[in-house]
Image (cartoon, grey):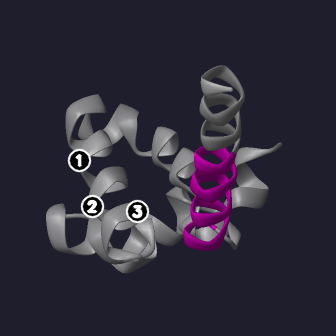
Amino acid sequence: MSSSLSQSFSFFLNKLMFSNFHKRCSGPDKNPILVTALNPIIGYDKGAKIAKRAYAEGKTLKEVALEETDLSEHELDKILDPLKLTQ
């Protein structure tokens, strides 16, 4: 019975974490994977810091990057354009 309870609890936690991640990252502008486009410009460590903060605060990467970097809004729009990144 302990094993069954443990499996149920594990399933519940995974489901809860995924649904929370999905809510926080809905929309391309909130997807933390876009930070990879910034990494060559600002470095991996700063990019990771921006992604973590954006996720924790429910902000977009652009909002946090505007506060954490010297990049302009126009530059960030060009760098973080999801359509451009897929071509």
Placement of 35 over or under 78, stated as above or below: above
Q: Magenta residues: mostly which secondary structure?
A: helix
Quadrant location of the C terminus? top right
Find disc 1 in the rendering and name its residue: 49
Residue at (60%, 30%) from the top-left corner?
A: 6
Q: Find residue 4 and name its label.
A: none
Query: Is residue 20 placed above or below 87 in the rendered structure?
Result: below
| Image coordinates for residue 64, horizontal then vertical, percent | 29, 70
Are dots 3 and 2 in contact, CB under 8 Å? yes
* Numbered circles on residues, count: 3
Residue 53: give its label. 2
Left or right of 20? Residue 48 is left
SS class of the residue under badge 1?
helix
Q: Which residues are magenta?
A: 12-25
Q: Residue at x 35, y 77 (%)?
A: 63
Residue type at tag 3: Tyr
Q: Quadrant of residue 42?
A: top left
For the point 41% across and 71% down, which residue is it? 62
